[in-house]
Amino acid sequence: MNRLFRRFAVLVTLSISVAAVIAYFAMSWLFGDPQESIARRQAAGQIFLLEQYVDQAPADEWLGRLNKVREVSEVRFDLLPLAAARQLLPASTRAAFERGEVVIDVRHKAFLRRVDLIGERYIGSNEEAIHAQDLPIDVGLALKMEAVRYLIVALVVLVPIAAWSRAHWRSLQKLAQMADEFGQGQLTARVHLPASEAIHPLAECFNHMAERIERLLDAQSSLLHSVSHEIRTPIARLEFALELLRDAAQSPALEERIAAMEGDLHELNQLVSELLGMIRMGDQPLKRERFDLAETLRSVADSLPPAAPALDVLVADNVDSYRGDRRLLLRAVCNLMRNAQKYAATRVALSAARRLDGVRIVVEDDGPGIPQAEREKIFDPFYRLDRSRDRSTGGFGLGLSIARKAIELHGGAIAVDSSPMGGARFTIRLPTD
Ligand code: ADP
């Protein structure tokens, strides 16, 4: 049963139940208690007998006729003193009783009526009431029939809704699947629904949106790609020219200037290489292979400069092999570790463990951490916090976006929060391989 139908079913059932309650009270208000009118209909035979046979008898035969009815009927007809009869009645029916009307007692399957208002049937008949009991009244059955009627209405309403919601649910699921695939980077994902489907226009809007995003991303990546590529040639030419200039340089001041320019060029070269690397990462398929993840993580720690912050490595025993692109994963963890080393005050920790839903790798430090408002933005290319804009700590602001891309290509996720150690804590979640 789909979720759409479940919601409708609950709504329809609730509406019909509310309608039944409203109908009951409306009927009571407009036409009197429906239970009483059901009971009156069911006791109509006995009431008819009393009014049309017994009451029509001449004054001296009234009791005789009543006795005849008693003999043949399964209903008990008793005569009660008025005071006792009044005690049996609720206040709301008393006035009708005093007027000489038949008053139904639904709960006890009985009715009461004064024998006579002016005492002409027999001596004292105006002081007595007739109490009929064991009447063939079954209000429960009538109510059950009413409930079955509402149930049939509910079912008849729900059947077309079920068919309608089934078709819509399937289309919605296709739409959700396409949005999911698109969100995971499959930019060619589209949804195809027949034009007769009610949500066809919505699907078309999704497709147009996806097309535009795909085109924009394509344009962005090819622009970045071409610019980075084109820049390489003038850089190479500049390097060559500086080399020649250095050979011809006469003064130490000029040599120093040339060295600074070479430094800048080297930095530019690095930036271009990183950019190209990042763009290619998305273009090329992953080179998935099974490798020893524990050993790879330990090698990250070994490859870092043994400098200042102390390094704790804790790789759980359940982390063994993993199927993925070793080079990319290594790059992601290395980028996080290098940042942690850069910003830590005294300590950096790398830990990893395998869980039910995959592998979790955590890199944390005791540095300044990352303010809440910046935690999403730092994964954008070229985004750096103000404090890292100086040369000594800052890179190009590409390290984290490269790490995120590498992890997302594996179907995983990377997030940052604050570490109990005081600084930033980066958590990589890789899905089960
Ligand atoms: P960069 O090359 O500038 O380090 P990244 O993309 O690796 O670029 O990081 C983006 C920014 O996030 C950094 O400039 C820095 O401000 C911040 N950052 C990254 N890691 C840490 C960390 N462990 N502690 C504090 N800030 C960090």
Image (spheres, rainbow, N blue to C red):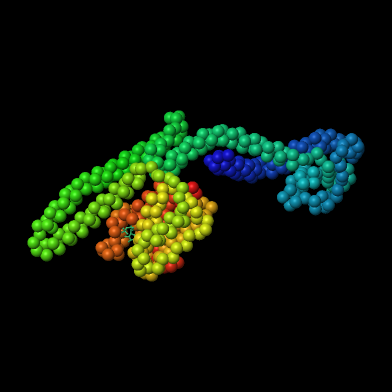
The answer to whether one can see residue 111 in this image is no
Residue at (70% x, 37% y) in the render: 145
Q: Is residue 256 left or right of residue 177?
A: left
The quadrant of the image that shows the N terminus is top right
How many labels were placed on the picture?
0
Q: Is residue 395 left or right of residue 71?
A: left
Q: Residue furthest front?
A: 247
Residue at (87% x, 37% y) in the render: 73
Q: Is residue 418 above or below residue 120?
A: below
Residue at (51% x, 51% y) in the render: 357
Residue at (83% x, 52% y) in the render: 84
Q: Is residue 418 left or right of residue 226?
A: right
Q: Is residue 86 above or below residue 187?
A: below
Query: In x, y percent, where is residue 153?
Result: 62, 35
Query: In x, y percent, where is residue 383?
Result: 31, 56
Q: Is residue 152 left or right of residue 39?
A: left
Along the viewing direction, whichever of 420 and 87 lies nearer the viewer: 420
Query: In x, y percent, where is residue 340?
Result: 37, 63
